[in-house]
Structures are given as C-alpha cells and as structure tokens.
Amino acid sequence: MTQTVDVYYSLSSPWTYLGWLRFDTIARKAGAKVNHWPVDFGKIFPVSGGLPLPQRPAQRRAYRMMELKRWRDHLGIAINLEPQFFPTQEGLAAHLAIAARRRGHDIGWLSYAILRAVWVEERNIADADTLLAIANGLGFDGKGLLAEAATDAVKAERERDNQRAIELQVFGAPTFVIDGELFWGQDRLDFVARKLGL
C-alpha cells in the first residue's frame, strides 16, 4: 500500500532547503506519495508560540547560525548562511507554487528551485521576474502561473492549507506528516525513513 507524506514548509526556510534532497531520496526509495503544502508561518507562529527570526532572543539566533554551519559542513551542501534576500516575503512564491499544484504539477522541484534561489543563488523570490524565470526554467508556463497566483482562489487555497497545518499542530518548517504523526525538522529525516519502512 502506497504511503502518503504531507510536507508543510516555508519557501524561505534554510532547514527546508537543507533537507529537501534527502527527503526526496527517502520518499522515492519508499515509493511514497508526497503532498507539498507551502504554508505561511507568519500565520502559524502566533498560534504555536513561534517567533519570526528577527524577534528571537540573541542566544537563539546565535545558536541557529551555529547549527546551520554544522549542518552545512556535515551534509556538504552549498548554502549562503546570510543571503542578501532574507528574510523575505514569500507569499508570491507560495501562490505561484500553489497555482502550479492546482494545474496538477508536482511542485517538489519548483519548491526546491525557489529555495535554492534564496540560499545559493542570491535571488529575490519576492520579485515576479525572478519567479517567472525560475518557473520557465523548469518548463512551466511562468506567465500563466503568475497570473493565476494573483487570484482569490489561490490565496484562499493557501489560507485553507494554513488552517489545516494549524489543526494538525504544525509549528515549524519543515514538518512531515505520515498517518497523523508529525516529524519536525530536517534533522528528523531518519525517523521519517523508518516510518516509511526503510
């Protein structure tokens, strides 16, 4: 029986970026179906006790940076720890991804390309032209997706996704949900793999 993994994530999260390819490998090996939900942690944090990065205490920000360096070195993954366009407004990027999802596309690689744009390529994902280039580069109809991203239907869909995440008690990115069980963080991927029978 095919297992399903629901992934709730931020399109500007370094942790989501660091775990993306490893999770993709795990899901493919397990033959799992993956549902991608790029949600708004600006809506989730207030009801889950989280704080945006600039509002976190200095010691938490310092430890975050130390952990990013550790994981960068451990995984051997390219990442700019202080990218030019971070923090950023990711709403348009999320709406673009949702528009692609509504058209039946697998938005996994689109999401990864957006994450790489922030954390490797020094690109501004709040900029429509940047998103157009990313979508077109993957063979999508970037212009059409941007037009659909601006619709009330897409915005309402993201709100429903946010509410589902809140109801599931998602509080951080990335969160993987399998059979109602939550696994928070790219550092929990070993447990995700076990849950999927690997």
Image (spheres, rainbow, N blue to C red):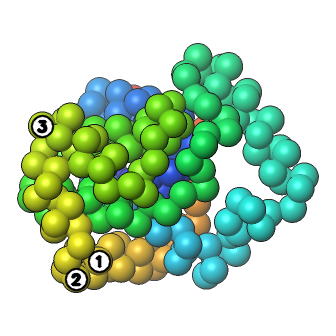
What is the CA distance from the residue labelled 2 to the residue labelled 1?
Answer: 5 Å
What is the CA distance from the residue labelled 3 to the residue labelled 2?
Answer: 25 Å
Is label 2 in a helix, a strand or a loop? helix
**Residue occupying image coordinates x 25% and y 41%:** 133
Does residue 191 appear in the picture of this structure?
A: no
Query: Which comes sooner in the sequence, label 3 or label 1?
Result: 3
- Check contact, mark 2 vs mark 1: CB within 8 A: yes
For the C terminus, the quadrant is top left
Is label 1 in a helix, a strand or a loop? helix
The answer to whether 41 appears left or right of 7 in the picture is: right
Dot 3: within a 10 Å radius of its alpha carbon, few (fewer than 14), some, or many (20 or more) residues? few
Q: Which residue is mark 1?
A: 155
Where is residue 52 shown, x and y percent of the image? Answer: 67, 66
Does residue 136 appear in the picture of this structure?
A: yes
The amino acid at mark 3 is: Gly
Is label 3 in a helix, a strand or a loop? loop
Q: Which residue is mark 3?
A: 139
The image quarter in which residue 35 lies: bottom left
Q: Which residue is mark 2?
A: 152
As rendered, which of 152 and 198 lies closer to the eye?
152
The image quarter in which residue 139 lies: top left
- Check contact, mark 3 vs mark 1: CB within 8 A: no
**Residue occupying image coordinates x 46% and y 48%:** 124
